[in-house]
Image: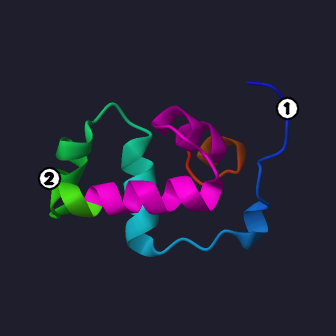
């Protein structure tokens, strides 16, 4: 991990509570199906959260999502 700033300014990021919860769980070792189970939603709903955050943060993978979240202080591990 280098010290490049996130692709999008963090003050422009507005997360809904469910998206923030998903992001916290996505930074764990849980699978997307397990995340859906913990959030009491369908796996397709989790897919929707994932795709929305990928687009919003301009990342292409779960690893990119986690790195962005950690750099921006959106999650604490």
On the picture, is 50 further left or further right than 61?
left
| Residue depicted at 31% across the width and 55% down the height | 47
Question: Element at badge 1?
Answer: loop
On the picture, is 38 further left or further right than 23?
left
Give the residues in magenta: 46-68
Residue 60 sits inside the magenta stretch = yes
Question: Element at badge 2?
Answer: helix
Residue 56 sits inside the magenta stretch = yes
Q: Badge 2 is on which residue?
A: 37
Can you give x and y, in whole percent of width and height, for residue 49 in the image?
38, 61
Q: Quadrant of residue 36?
A: bottom left
Q: Is residue 42 above or below residue 15?
A: above
On the picture, is 45 further left or further right than 48?
left
Q: Badge 1 is on which residue?
A: 3
Local packing at callout 1 (Cα closer than 10 Å; few below 14, some 14-19, many 20+) is few
Estimate the spatial distance between the alpha carbons at disc 1 and disc 2, rounded to whole Å: 35 Å
Q: Quadrant of residue 1?
A: top right
Please name the predominant secondary structure of the magenta segment in the image: helix
Dot 1 or dot 2, earlier in sequence: 1
| Residue depicted at 60% across the width and 62% down the height | 56
Can you give x and y, in whole percent of width and height, for residue 50 in the image?
41, 54
Q: Are marks 1 and 2 in contact (CB under 8 Å)?
A: no
Can you give x and y, in whole percent of width and height, for residue 65 in the image?
55, 44
Observer-nearest residue: 29 or 7? 7
Local packing at callout 2 (Cα closer than 10 Å; few below 14, some 14-19, many 20+) is few
| Residue depicted at 15% across the width and 63% down the height | 40
Q: Quadrant of residue 66?
A: top right
């Amino acid at each position: 991990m280098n010290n490049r700033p996130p692709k999008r300014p963090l003050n422009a990021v507005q997360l809904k509570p469910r998206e923030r919860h998903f992001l916290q769980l996505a930074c764990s070792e849980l699978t997307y199906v397990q995340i859906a189970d913990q959030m009491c939603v369908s796996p397709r709903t989790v897919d929707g959260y994932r795709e929305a955050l990928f687009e919003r943060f301009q990342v292409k993978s779960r690893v990119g999502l986690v790195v962005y979240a950690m750099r921006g202080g959106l999650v604490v591990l």
